[in-house]
Image (tube, rainbow, N blue to C red):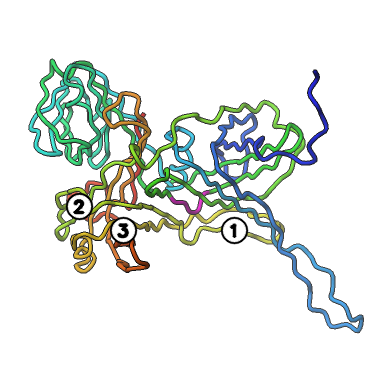
Amino acid sequence: MSPTVGYSAALDTNDLVMSIVPEATWGVTPATPSFKSLRLDGEGFSGSKTRARPNEINPSGQASAAVTTKEESTGSLNFSVSASETSNLLLASALNGAFTPPVDYSGDDVAISAASGTTCTLTAAGGSFLTTNQVIPGQFLKVFADGSGSANGSFIGRVVTVSATDITFDCCSKTMITVLLAAMGTTTIKGSCLRNGTTFNSFTVEKKMSATLYLRYAGSFPTEGSLEVGVGDFLKGSMSFINKAEVAAIVGISGATYAAATVGTVIDSVRGIGTVWRGVNAGSTSGAVSTIAGIVQKLSVKWTKEGAAGQYGIGSAAAVGVRSGRILVTGSISTFFANLDLYNQYLNEQAGPISFYAIDGLPTASATRGYVITFCNANIMNPKVVAGSASADFMADFEIEGAPDISSPSLFAGKTLQIDYFA
Protein backbone atom coordinates (compact mmCIF):
# COMPACT_ATOMS: atom_id res chain seq x y z
CA MET A 1 0.00 0.00 0.00
CA SER A 2 1.32 3.46 -0.88
CA PRO A 3 1.65 5.92 2.01
CA THR A 4 -1.04 8.55 2.45
CA VAL A 5 -0.02 12.07 1.50
CA GLY A 6 -1.50 15.53 2.02
CA TYR A 7 -2.55 14.76 5.59
CA SER A 8 -0.77 17.57 7.49
CA ALA A 9 -1.91 21.16 7.45
CA ALA A 10 1.23 22.42 9.22
CA LEU A 11 4.94 21.80 9.53
CA ASP A 12 5.94 19.50 12.39
CA THR A 13 8.37 20.92 14.95
CA ASN A 14 9.95 17.44 15.21
CA ASP A 15 11.36 18.02 11.72
CA LEU A 16 13.25 21.14 12.77
CA VAL A 17 17.00 21.14 12.09
CA MET A 18 18.78 23.88 14.02
CA SER A 19 22.40 24.46 12.98
CA ILE A 20 25.25 26.86 13.66
CA VAL A 21 28.41 27.88 11.82
CA PRO A 22 31.14 30.17 13.21
CA GLU A 23 31.66 33.50 11.44
CA ALA A 24 35.04 34.99 10.51
CA THR A 25 33.43 38.43 10.20
CA TRP A 26 30.47 39.42 12.37
CA GLY A 27 27.18 39.18 10.50
CA VAL A 28 28.70 37.51 7.41
CA THR A 29 27.77 33.87 6.78
CA PRO A 30 30.69 31.87 5.29
CA ALA A 31 30.33 31.39 1.51
CA THR A 32 30.25 27.57 1.82
CA PRO A 33 29.29 27.05 5.45
CA SER A 34 30.00 23.86 7.37
CA PHE A 35 26.98 23.82 9.67
CA LYS A 36 26.87 21.80 12.88
CA SER A 37 23.41 20.61 13.90
CA LEU A 38 22.25 21.06 17.49
CA ARG A 39 20.44 18.88 19.98
CA LEU A 40 17.79 21.01 21.67
CA ASP A 41 14.62 20.90 23.73
CA GLY A 42 13.29 24.18 22.40
CA GLU A 43 14.27 27.44 20.74
CA GLY A 44 13.11 31.03 20.57
CA PHE A 45 14.79 32.71 17.60
CA SER A 46 12.75 35.49 16.07
CA GLY A 47 12.87 38.97 14.60
CA SER A 48 10.91 42.11 15.33
CA LYS A 49 10.55 45.69 14.13
CA THR A 50 10.07 48.85 16.16
CA ARG A 51 7.60 51.22 14.54
CA ALA A 52 6.94 54.84 15.50
CA ARG A 53 4.34 57.40 14.50
CA PRO A 54 5.02 61.14 14.24
CA ASN A 55 2.86 63.03 16.71
CA GLU A 56 1.49 65.41 14.10
CA ILE A 57 -1.07 68.07 14.81
CA ASN A 58 -3.83 67.86 12.21
CA PRO A 59 -7.67 68.05 12.04
CA SER A 60 -8.17 64.57 10.47
CA GLY A 61 -8.99 62.84 13.75
CA GLN A 62 -6.57 59.97 13.05
CA ALA A 63 -3.00 59.02 13.88
CA SER A 64 -0.28 59.45 11.29
CA ALA A 65 1.23 56.44 9.52
CA ALA A 66 4.00 54.56 11.33
CA VAL A 67 7.51 54.08 9.99
CA THR A 68 10.16 51.47 10.87
CA THR A 69 12.83 52.89 13.17
CA LYS A 70 14.60 49.74 14.30
CA GLU A 71 14.89 46.06 13.44
CA GLU A 72 15.94 43.58 16.13
CA SER A 73 16.47 39.86 16.40
CA THR A 74 16.98 37.74 19.49
CA GLY A 75 17.09 34.03 20.18
CA SER A 76 17.24 31.36 22.83
CA LEU A 77 18.20 27.71 23.06
CA ASN A 78 17.12 25.23 25.72
CA PHE A 79 18.91 21.89 25.77
CA SER A 80 19.74 18.80 27.77
CA VAL A 81 23.51 18.75 28.15
CA SER A 82 25.65 16.07 26.54
CA ALA A 83 29.39 16.35 26.03
CA SER A 84 30.26 17.36 22.46
CA GLU A 85 32.50 19.59 20.38
CA THR A 86 29.41 21.49 19.19
CA SER A 87 28.46 22.28 22.78
CA ASN A 88 32.03 23.47 23.27
CA LEU A 89 31.72 25.96 20.40
CA LEU A 90 28.72 27.54 22.10
CA LEU A 91 30.28 27.47 25.58
CA ALA A 92 33.48 29.13 24.35
CA SER A 93 31.54 31.93 22.68
CA ALA A 94 29.31 32.26 25.74
CA LEU A 95 32.34 32.92 27.97
CA ASN A 96 34.24 35.04 25.41
CA GLY A 97 37.02 32.47 25.63
CA ALA A 98 38.61 29.47 23.94
CA PHE A 99 39.37 25.93 25.09
CA THR A 100 43.08 25.24 25.56
CA PRO A 101 44.73 22.77 23.16
CA PRO A 102 43.63 19.30 24.29
CA VAL A 103 45.92 17.33 26.57
CA ASP A 104 45.91 13.88 24.99
CA TYR A 105 48.75 11.82 26.44
CA SER A 106 49.03 8.05 26.21
CA GLY A 107 51.94 6.05 27.58
CA ASP A 108 53.06 3.11 29.70
CA ASP A 109 55.38 5.26 31.84
CA VAL A 110 52.82 6.61 34.33
CA ALA A 111 52.84 6.00 38.08
CA ILE A 112 50.93 7.40 41.07
CA SER A 113 52.80 8.36 44.24
CA ALA A 114 52.49 10.60 47.32
CA ALA A 115 48.85 9.55 47.57
CA SER A 116 46.91 10.89 50.54
CA GLY A 117 43.15 11.17 50.66
CA THR A 118 42.08 12.89 47.46
CA THR A 119 45.57 14.16 46.56
CA CYS A 120 48.41 12.49 44.70
CA THR A 121 51.34 13.00 42.34
CA LEU A 122 51.36 11.56 38.82
CA THR A 123 54.69 10.98 37.08
CA ALA A 124 55.16 10.29 33.36
CA ALA A 125 58.72 10.35 31.99
CA GLY A 126 57.48 11.28 28.51
CA GLY A 127 54.65 13.53 29.62
CA SER A 128 55.99 16.81 28.21
CA PHE A 129 53.36 18.55 30.33
CA LEU A 130 54.78 22.02 29.71
CA THR A 131 55.19 21.73 25.92
CA THR A 132 53.56 19.02 23.81
CA ASN A 133 50.78 18.43 26.33
CA GLN A 134 50.33 21.84 27.88
CA VAL A 135 48.83 21.38 31.33
CA ILE A 136 47.93 24.46 33.38
CA PRO A 137 47.36 24.78 37.14
CA GLY A 138 43.70 24.78 38.08
CA GLN A 139 42.45 22.65 35.20
CA PHE A 140 40.82 19.26 35.72
CA LEU A 141 42.11 16.19 33.89
CA LYS A 142 40.78 12.67 33.37
CA VAL A 143 43.30 9.88 33.95
CA PHE A 144 42.55 6.33 32.80
CA ALA A 145 44.81 3.33 33.42
CA ASP A 146 44.11 0.06 31.63
CA GLY A 147 46.46 -2.12 33.67
CA SER A 148 45.84 -4.27 36.75
CA GLY A 149 45.75 -1.08 38.81
CA SER A 150 43.03 0.52 36.74
CA ALA A 151 40.55 0.72 39.62
CA ASN A 152 43.03 2.72 41.68
CA GLY A 153 44.81 4.62 38.92
CA SER A 154 41.77 5.98 37.03
CA PHE A 155 40.30 9.24 38.30
CA ILE A 156 39.38 12.87 37.63
CA GLY A 157 41.46 15.46 39.46
CA ARG A 158 42.48 19.12 39.62
CA VAL A 159 46.03 20.19 38.76
CA VAL A 160 47.78 22.03 41.59
CA THR A 161 51.32 22.14 40.23
CA VAL A 162 52.89 20.87 37.02
CA SER A 163 56.38 20.23 35.65
CA ALA A 164 57.58 18.53 32.48
CA THR A 165 57.08 15.07 33.99
CA ASP A 166 55.00 15.51 37.15
CA ILE A 167 51.50 16.68 38.02
CA THR A 168 50.25 17.09 41.57
CA PHE A 169 46.49 16.68 41.93
CA ASP A 170 43.87 17.50 44.49
CA CYS A 171 40.05 17.20 44.30
CA CYS A 172 40.47 13.65 43.02
CA SER A 173 37.24 11.78 42.35
CA LYS A 174 38.27 8.94 44.67
CA THR A 175 40.54 8.17 47.61
CA MET A 176 43.97 7.78 46.07
CA ILE A 177 46.61 5.13 46.78
CA THR A 178 50.07 4.54 45.35
CA VAL A 179 50.01 2.67 42.02
CA LEU A 180 53.27 1.46 40.52
CA LEU A 181 54.15 1.92 36.88
CA ALA A 182 53.70 -1.77 36.06
CA ALA A 183 50.18 -1.80 37.47
CA MET A 184 49.05 1.32 35.61
CA GLY A 185 49.57 -0.21 32.16
CA THR A 186 48.91 2.09 29.22
CA THR A 187 47.54 5.29 30.70
CA THR A 188 45.72 8.15 28.99
CA ILE A 189 45.54 11.70 30.33
CA LYS A 190 42.97 14.00 28.75
CA GLY A 191 41.50 17.45 29.23
CA SER A 192 40.94 20.92 27.82
CA CYS A 193 40.19 24.08 29.80
CA LEU A 194 37.94 27.08 29.08
CA ARG A 195 38.00 30.28 31.12
CA ASN A 196 36.12 33.52 30.58
CA GLY A 197 38.04 36.01 28.50
CA THR A 198 37.70 38.78 25.94
CA THR A 199 37.56 36.84 22.65
CA PHE A 200 34.53 37.61 20.48
CA ASN A 201 32.97 34.76 18.48
CA SER A 202 29.65 34.91 16.62
CA PHE A 203 27.64 32.46 14.55
CA THR A 204 25.14 32.23 11.78
CA VAL A 205 22.20 30.22 13.08
CA GLU A 206 19.95 28.43 10.61
CA LYS A 207 16.46 27.20 11.39
CA LYS A 208 15.44 24.67 8.73
CA MET A 209 11.74 23.81 8.96
CA SER A 210 11.46 22.06 5.59
CA ALA A 211 13.40 21.66 2.36
CA THR A 212 11.82 24.89 1.14
CA LEU A 213 11.53 26.99 4.29
CA TYR A 214 14.42 28.49 6.26
CA LEU A 215 15.02 31.32 8.72
CA ARG A 216 18.60 32.49 9.22
CA TYR A 217 20.20 34.69 11.85
CA ALA A 218 23.63 36.08 11.02
CA GLY A 219 25.73 37.82 13.68
CA SER A 220 24.33 35.63 16.48
CA PHE A 221 26.14 36.32 19.75
CA PRO A 222 25.35 34.64 23.11
CA THR A 223 24.69 37.15 25.88
CA GLU A 224 23.65 34.96 28.81
CA GLY A 225 23.24 31.34 29.77
CA SER A 226 22.88 28.81 32.54
CA LEU A 227 23.56 25.22 33.54
CA GLU A 228 21.48 23.64 36.30
CA VAL A 229 20.68 20.24 37.73
CA GLY A 230 18.57 18.88 40.57
CA VAL A 231 17.63 15.56 42.13
CA GLY A 232 15.64 13.38 39.73
CA ASP A 233 16.63 15.43 36.72
CA PHE A 234 19.39 15.86 34.16
CA LEU A 235 21.78 18.71 33.47
CA LYS A 236 19.86 21.43 31.63
CA GLY A 237 21.32 24.32 29.70
CA SER A 238 20.00 27.54 28.25
CA MET A 239 21.49 30.38 26.21
CA SER A 240 20.18 33.70 24.95
CA PHE A 241 21.43 35.48 21.83
CA ILE A 242 21.29 38.80 20.04
CA ASN A 243 21.43 38.62 16.24
CA LYS A 244 22.03 41.05 13.40
CA ALA A 245 18.72 40.28 11.71
CA GLU A 246 16.25 37.56 10.74
CA VAL A 247 16.26 36.58 7.06
CA ALA A 248 13.83 34.16 5.37
CA ALA A 249 14.76 31.84 2.49
CA ILE A 250 13.18 29.06 0.44
CA VAL A 251 16.42 27.33 -0.61
CA GLY A 252 19.51 26.14 1.22
CA ILE A 253 22.89 27.84 0.88
CA SER A 254 24.77 26.50 -2.12
CA GLY A 255 27.66 24.28 -1.04
CA ALA A 256 26.59 24.14 2.60
CA THR A 257 27.31 20.96 4.53
CA TYR A 258 25.70 19.73 7.73
CA ALA A 259 27.29 17.66 10.48
CA ALA A 260 24.69 15.59 12.33
CA ALA A 261 23.87 16.43 15.92
CA THR A 262 25.74 14.43 18.54
CA VAL A 263 24.07 11.36 20.01
CA GLY A 264 25.98 11.05 23.30
CA THR A 265 24.38 10.27 26.64
CA VAL A 266 22.62 13.14 28.40
CA ILE A 267 24.23 13.92 31.76
CA ASP A 268 21.94 12.90 34.64
CA SER A 269 21.91 13.68 38.35
CA VAL A 270 22.57 10.12 39.55
CA ARG A 271 25.91 9.03 38.12
CA GLY A 272 26.63 12.14 36.07
CA ILE A 273 26.98 14.79 38.80
CA GLY A 274 29.92 14.12 41.06
CA THR A 275 31.35 15.49 44.28
CA VAL A 276 30.89 19.21 44.90
CA TRP A 277 34.19 20.71 46.04
CA ARG A 278 34.52 23.89 48.07
CA GLY A 279 37.69 25.79 48.94
CA VAL A 280 37.85 28.72 51.38
CA ASN A 281 40.68 31.18 50.81
CA ALA A 282 42.57 32.62 53.76
CA GLY A 283 42.96 36.24 52.70
CA SER A 284 44.80 36.09 49.38
CA THR A 285 46.09 32.57 50.04
CA SER A 286 44.36 29.71 48.26
CA GLY A 287 42.80 27.50 50.91
CA ALA A 288 42.51 23.73 51.08
CA VAL A 289 39.49 22.20 49.36
CA SER A 290 37.02 19.71 50.74
CA THR A 291 33.66 18.29 49.82
CA ILE A 292 30.57 20.39 50.51
CA ALA A 293 29.32 19.69 54.01
CA GLY A 294 25.78 18.60 53.27
CA ILE A 295 23.75 16.57 50.80
CA VAL A 296 23.30 18.68 47.69
CA GLN A 297 19.84 18.79 46.13
CA LYS A 298 20.27 21.38 43.40
CA LEU A 299 23.06 23.32 41.67
CA SER A 300 23.10 26.09 39.11
CA VAL A 301 25.58 28.40 37.42
CA LYS A 302 24.44 31.45 35.48
CA TRP A 303 26.32 34.03 33.48
CA THR A 304 25.30 37.22 31.78
CA LYS A 305 27.22 39.75 29.69
CA GLU A 306 26.32 43.05 31.30
CA GLY A 307 25.95 45.80 28.72
CA ALA A 308 25.96 43.49 25.68
CA ALA A 309 23.71 44.95 23.00
CA GLY A 310 23.32 45.65 19.32
CA GLN A 311 24.78 48.88 17.98
CA TYR A 312 22.68 50.96 15.60
CA GLY A 313 23.36 53.86 13.26
CA ILE A 314 21.48 56.15 10.89
CA GLY A 315 20.76 54.53 7.53
CA SER A 316 20.29 50.98 8.83
CA ALA A 317 17.29 49.48 10.59
CA ALA A 318 19.35 46.40 11.52
CA ALA A 319 22.26 46.40 13.95
CA VAL A 320 25.61 47.48 12.49
CA GLY A 321 27.68 45.99 15.30
CA VAL A 322 27.63 44.43 18.78
CA ARG A 323 28.91 45.59 22.15
CA SER A 324 30.23 42.45 23.85
CA GLY A 325 29.69 43.50 27.48
CA ARG A 326 31.38 42.07 30.57
CA ILE A 327 30.71 38.73 32.22
CA LEU A 328 28.90 38.48 35.57
CA VAL A 329 28.64 35.01 37.14
CA THR A 330 26.07 33.93 39.72
CA GLY A 331 24.47 30.67 40.78
CA SER A 332 22.75 28.77 43.54
CA ILE A 333 23.14 25.68 45.68
CA SER A 334 20.52 23.89 47.78
CA THR A 335 21.41 21.36 50.48
CA PHE A 336 19.76 19.58 53.37
CA PHE A 337 20.25 21.87 56.37
CA ALA A 338 22.21 19.65 58.77
CA ASN A 339 25.09 21.87 59.98
CA LEU A 340 26.36 25.45 60.02
CA ASP A 341 29.41 25.03 57.77
CA LEU A 342 28.04 26.83 54.70
CA TYR A 343 26.01 29.20 56.86
CA ASN A 344 29.17 30.33 58.69
CA GLN A 345 30.93 30.86 55.36
CA TYR A 346 28.05 33.19 54.49
CA LEU A 347 28.29 35.06 57.79
CA ASN A 348 32.07 35.45 57.51
CA GLU A 349 31.96 36.22 53.77
CA GLN A 350 34.56 33.55 53.09
CA ALA A 351 35.36 33.27 49.38
CA GLY A 352 36.89 30.44 47.38
CA PRO A 353 36.29 28.06 44.46
CA ILE A 354 33.32 25.73 43.98
CA SER A 355 33.63 22.85 41.50
CA PHE A 356 31.49 19.94 40.40
CA TYR A 357 31.86 17.47 37.59
CA ALA A 358 29.13 16.60 35.11
CA ILE A 359 29.93 13.45 33.11
CA ASP A 360 28.11 10.84 31.02
CA GLY A 361 29.57 7.78 32.73
CA LEU A 362 31.70 6.65 35.65
CA PRO A 363 34.80 8.77 36.39
CA THR A 364 36.91 5.59 36.16
CA ALA A 365 35.59 4.51 32.74
CA SER A 366 37.65 4.89 29.57
CA ALA A 367 34.85 6.23 27.36
CA THR A 368 33.46 8.75 29.85
CA ARG A 369 33.05 12.27 28.47
CA GLY A 370 31.99 15.39 30.28
CA TYR A 371 32.76 18.61 32.06
CA VAL A 372 33.90 20.08 35.35
CA ILE A 373 32.28 23.44 36.13
CA THR A 374 34.16 25.75 38.51
CA PHE A 375 33.34 29.06 40.15
CA CYS A 376 36.94 30.28 40.40
CA ASN A 377 36.13 32.47 43.39
CA ALA A 378 32.71 32.54 45.02
CA ASN A 379 30.89 33.76 48.08
CA ILE A 380 27.95 31.75 49.41
CA MET A 381 25.27 34.30 50.24
CA ASN A 382 21.75 34.93 51.56
CA PRO A 383 20.61 31.54 52.87
CA LYS A 384 16.93 30.73 53.05
CA VAL A 385 16.24 28.13 55.72
CA VAL A 386 12.47 27.91 56.16
CA ALA A 387 9.77 25.43 57.10
CA GLY A 388 7.53 25.82 54.08
CA SER A 389 5.14 23.01 55.00
CA ALA A 390 4.52 20.13 57.36
CA SER A 391 6.34 16.80 56.94
CA ALA A 392 9.10 18.23 54.74
CA ASP A 393 12.88 18.40 54.81
CA PHE A 394 14.66 21.49 56.10
CA MET A 395 16.54 22.91 53.14
CA ALA A 396 19.21 25.60 52.92
CA ASP A 397 19.04 27.54 49.67
CA PHE A 398 22.12 29.70 49.07
CA GLU A 399 22.96 32.18 46.35
CA ILE A 400 26.41 31.93 44.78
CA GLU A 401 28.17 35.20 44.00
CA GLY A 402 30.98 34.71 41.48
CA ALA A 403 34.07 36.94 41.37
CA PRO A 404 37.54 36.95 39.78
CA ASP A 405 40.05 34.69 41.51
CA ILE A 406 42.39 36.82 43.63
CA SER A 407 44.26 34.04 45.46
CA SER A 408 48.05 34.11 45.31
CA PRO A 409 49.40 32.23 43.53
CA SER A 410 46.23 32.15 41.46
CA LEU A 411 45.15 28.70 40.32
CA PHE A 412 42.70 30.25 37.86
CA ALA A 413 44.71 33.13 36.37
CA GLY A 414 42.40 35.75 37.86
CA LYS A 415 39.30 34.44 36.06
CA THR A 416 35.71 34.03 37.30
CA LEU A 417 34.36 30.87 35.61
CA GLN A 418 36.11 27.76 34.30
CA ILE A 419 34.71 24.81 32.34
CA ASP A 420 36.91 21.76 31.75
CA TYR A 421 36.15 19.22 29.04
CA PHE A 422 37.43 15.72 28.47
CA ALA A 423 36.48 12.99 26.02
* Residue at image point 44% right, 36% down: 266
Q: Real-space Cα distance between discs 2 and 3?
A: 14 Å
Question: Image quadrant of residue 175?
Answer: top left
According to the picture, the residue beneath numbered tag 2 turns out to be: 279
Give percent across and percent down for residue 135: 25, 33
User: Given the current orientation, which residue lies at the most extreme right position?
Assistant: 60
Give percent across and percent down for residue 271: 33, 37
For residue 205, above or below residue 351:
above
Question: Image quadrant of residue 311?
Answer: bottom right
According to the picture, the residue beneath numbered tag 3 turns out to be: 403
Circles 1, 3 touching at the beta carbon (< 8 Å) = no
Question: Which disc is residue 362 wearing?
Answer: none
Tell me the mark number nearer the camera, choosing from 1 and 3.
3
* Residue at image point 71% right, 45% down: 247
Q: Real-space Cα distance between discs 1 and 3?
A: 28 Å
Question: Image quadrant of residue 130?
Answer: top left
The secondary structure type at the circle numbered 1 is strand
Q: Nearer the viewer, residue 399 or 338?
A: 338
The residue stretch that appears in magenta = 222-226
Question: Which disc is residue 311 wearing?
Answer: 1
Residue 243 seen in this snapshot: yes
